[in-house]
Image (cartoon, coloured by chain):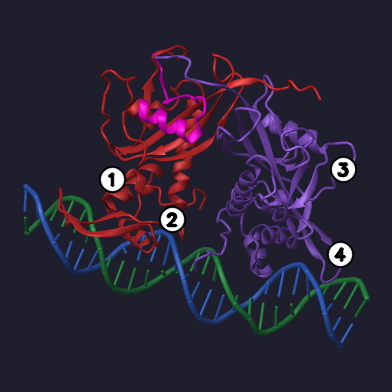
Chain colours: A red, B purple, C green, D blue
Amino acid sequence: MIEREHTYLRLAVDVAVLTVREGALAVLVITRANEPFRGRPALPGGFLREGEDIPEAAAREFAEETGLDPTALHLEQLKAYGAPDRDPRGRVVSVAFLAIMPDLPLPTPGSDARGAAWEPVDRVRGTLSFDHDRILDDAVEQARSRLEFTTLATAFCGAVFTMGDLRRVYEVVWGHELDPRNFSRKVINTPGFVEPTGAHKTSEAGRPAALYRAGGGTTLNPPILRASAGG
Amino acid sequence: MIEREHTYLRLAVDVAVLTVREGALAVLVITRANEPFRGRPALPGGFLREGEDIPEAAAREFAEETGLDPTALHLEQLKAYGAPDRDPRGRVVSVAFLAIMPDLPLPTPGSDARGAAWEPVDRVRGTLSFDHDRILDDAVEQARSRLEFTTLATAFCGAVFTMGDLRRVYEVVWGHELDPRNFSRKVINTPGFVEPTGAHKTSEAGRPAALYRAGGGTTLNPPILRASAGG
DNA sequence: ACAAAAGTGTTCCTTCTACACCCATGA
DNA sequence: TCATGGGTGTAGAAGGAACACTTTTGT
């Protein structure tokens, strides 16, 4: 009946960009240049603009804060966070995104830009601004789950990768080791996951590994389930 | 640099309430009382109010449009929808929710309230206002997936139910039949899914069925996977 | 020769699936 | 006694876990 039972607000978009780096799960963290939380770490993000769709805003924020091209980036929406007091500037609802990319060097490693840097997830946990710690937790859990049921792991790798590379993604994200031999078979027997390139990588030590690229599929059938924690 | 690169907007909350009713998956649909889309079907929803958290708003809208108590309701956030032109009234971002409840009669079946009614999902598909058709599709897919990995199916049933009741939930939501004997074993062998009450239901025809209530668990380990569509 | 990483073969075990068979009720 | 829905047993197939063993490189 009363038609003013609503409130105007601003919509923010925050992106948890994950990668595997130096054997650990890392997240892209910026140091805030403005109040609130000036000088404190936070996830990259910003406000939605006029006429802009939400995924568009997420890609733009990613590009602005990293200087990288977002077109090849895996970017998926997580959920919206809207506690009334989550932002001291006023009513701000944030739509959080999960992004996955290979371990690329950031173009401006602390020079002029807002200082985006890779940080191990375990190191930043509990230190982020706003409710970004919760967003990060949700993003990590989403990534863990996605590895079970989708081909997301290839998004952590470059254009070509070895079975060992792909397996290390699983091991780092899930936090436990996998049998290399069984893993290899499972991946190869899952249609659409990887395609052999025919080339081999003759690197550091050991027998040269076959190189693969990402396959056309997105869902894993059968899934690669985590070891059940209770069994 | 320019610190007005944002836009103020209103946040809507829309709820896809699903149930199993007369052997079909049904969704709660209202007939819109106001423009835009006046007289057209839509999902129940409304604007976020000042000082209100998002799940709170979803529960309130559910209660307002159905007259039912939302405390026992399964209510989970789906995602945010924010295409710039999704609402002709201006910039409105909607956070969609999935709700699951048993097939309860609605207190005001078309009397004074905004006319909430159960409609089979297959009947309303393609007829809803705004982008609610897409929201409904996403809600149904989320429900299908949740049945695989969580104890959500019990939310479709009343306080006590038979194995047949629970199985029919799966059959209706997934759209294909299941073997009653294997289903029963899977459910019983999944810890935390159901608890026997000891009572039996001596109804229509056949041998009396044991009655169960929902167990304490939320995740299904092992999951009950849908038959893979490609194999 | 030896270490290190990649990959193959095989065995054991759990789970899924299909279905024969038995149980308890109402008409 | 027959139809109907509930429930147990079991054999075969499929997939996962563990691990012995072989392959191919660098040092």
Q: Are marks 1 and 3 in contact (CB under 8 Å)?
A: no
Q: What residue type is labelled 3?
A: Gly
Mark 1 and mark 3, same subunit? no
The residues colored magenta run A39-64
Query: Tag 3, which chain?
Result: B
Q: Which of marks 1 and 2 is in front?
A: 1
Mark 2 and mark 3, same subunit? no
Q: How far apart are marks 2 and 3 (CA)?
A: 48 Å
Secondary-structure class at tag 1:
loop
Q: Could you say which disc has been placed on residue B58 in the image? A: none
Give the x, y percent position of residue A171: 36, 46
Residue at 15% across / 49% down in the picture? A203
Q: Could you say which disc has been placed on residue A158 in the image? A: 1
Position of B31 compared to A185: left or right? right
Query: Tag 4, which chain?
Result: B
Residue at 60% across / 20% down in the picture? A9
Residue at which label 4 appears? B202
Residue at 53% across / 64% down in the picture? B229
Residue at which label 3 appears? B110
Q: Relative to A4, is D9 above or below?
A: below
Q: In which quarter of the image is residue A172?
A: top left
Answer few, some or many: residues within 10 Å of disc 2's Cα (few below 14, many 20 plus, some between 14 and 19): some
Residue at which label 2 appears? A224
Q: Is residue B214 visible?
A: no
Mark 1 and mark 4, same subunit? no
Q: Is residue A47 visible?
A: yes
